Image (tube, grey):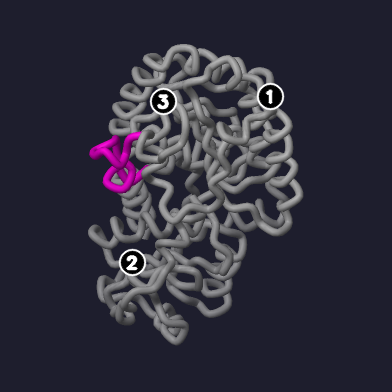
Amino acid sequence: MDTRIEAAGQTGRRAPAPDMDRVEVVAPNLKRRLSGVTSTIIQLVPLQAEMLGIATLGPGLPDSLPRMRWWQVFALLKRPASGRKRIWHARRNTEMVAGLVLKTLFRAPLKLVFTSAAQRDHRPFTKWLIRRMDAVIATSARSGGFLDVPHTVIMHGVDLEEFHPPRSGGDAFSASALPGKYAVGCFGRVRHQKGTDLFVDSMIELLPHYPDWTAVIAGRVTAEQKAFGDELESRVAKAGLSDRVVFLGEVPDIKPWYRRVSLYVAPSRNEGFGLTPLEAMASQTAVVASDAGAYAEMIVPGVTGSVVAAGDGDALTEAIRPYLADPALAEAHGVNALAHVTEHFPLQREAAAIRTIYDQVWAQG
């Protein structure tokens, strides 16, 4: 996901400043560091812009999005041409604070909406902020369980045009020039939280028994995680599997790799939401995942993949084993996964559900 966000953030021609008389929703992104929230805004806003007047505000976003300039913040002190109060859709504490400051101190005519992905008990200050929102969205039933206020669950969707089944020879694993007939992948930042070590240990256990398979690990290793990454590569080398557990590092485009692997593994110890299983399933790839984030709410066990307890390396290994033993099972579950995501997780469905929340907020007056 990191490479996809960065690619989206690369600048092209900068869109002109939006006409604030037409902007009825502001999607702030008050954090420079790229994150899952940034990715959500990048994906959703173009779809939302087809339904209503919306603009982003803040750094770290691609120039192609409708972006308010900082001097246009003053325009929030009056209503748009529609006469309705603007919606300020926050996804972080800082953005809730900014919305409250604008609304209470500067008397900006705003309605405040907050989306929560956190799967932990919120701190008192965060709870105080959430209680002052006009509407609250949870990205999963699990995250909603940590909210003390009425809320609506709207799970993230996936762009089915960007993530799709194999369409050409370049989408076949053979195009990678790596050894073996089949591949199992694990993508994302290489770090303890993401469970990359659990995946490596499973591969060291399993691959000697399944010579047709190769493991592919793709994702950034930050300076802070270099020792962790080096240690994983050392483990693989000691097991004599350096040619079959391949560390690609950060790749320019991860999407073809979802199509090349027959099985995707998401072994995170904890997540906020976690989009990679949806991206894999949209690519017609079966998924084995931990129950971190919203993974368990995406996968139909025995139909599209398998779910195991987060942090349980032995359970992860045993969940992966049947797919390596029977590639036809991976293929069948991949087909089921695509059908499941197409029905339940298209990005358009998420955008439409959020629009419904906006309409409910506006109906309150």
Please say if 356 is above or below 268: below
* 280 horizontally vs 185: left or right: left
The single residue placed furthest to the bottom in the displayed view is 71
Q: Residue at point 31% right, 48% down?
A: 162
Is there any visible trace of residue 235 in the rendered image? yes
Magenta residues, dominant SS class: loop
Mark closer to the observer (1, 3): 3
Q: Residue at x 44, y 68 (%)?
A: 61
Q: Nearer the viewer, residue 161 or 270?
A: 161
What quarter of the picture does the C terminus occupy?
Answer: bottom left
| Residue receiving disc 1 | 313
Dot 2: element: strand
Mark 2 sits on what residue? 54
Query: Which is more N-terminal, label 3 or label 2?
Result: 2
Dot 1 amino acid type: Gly
Q: Is 163 included in the stretch rendered in magenta?
A: yes
Q: Nearer the viewer, mark 2 or mark 1?
A: 1
* Secondary structure found at label 3: loop
Name the residue tied to disc 3. 181
Classify 10 Å Cα crowding around label 2: few (below 14), some (14-19), many (20 and above). Answer: many
Percent across and percent down for residue 67 are 38, 74
Q: Nearer the viewer, mark 2 or mark 3?
A: 3
From mark 2 to mark 3, how far is it between C-alphas? Answer: 47 Å
Look at 47% across and 21% down and name the residue there: 212
Quarter of the image holding residue 303? top left
216 is higher (above) or lower (below) than 249 = above
Q: Is residue 89 above or below residue 312?
A: below
**Crowdedness near tag 3: few (<14), some (14–19) or many (≥20) residues, C-alpha within 10 Å:** some
Q: Earlier in the sequence, mark 1 or mark 3?
A: 3
The answer to which of marks 2 and 1 sits earlier in the sequence is 2
Residue 350, percent from left and from top: 35, 45
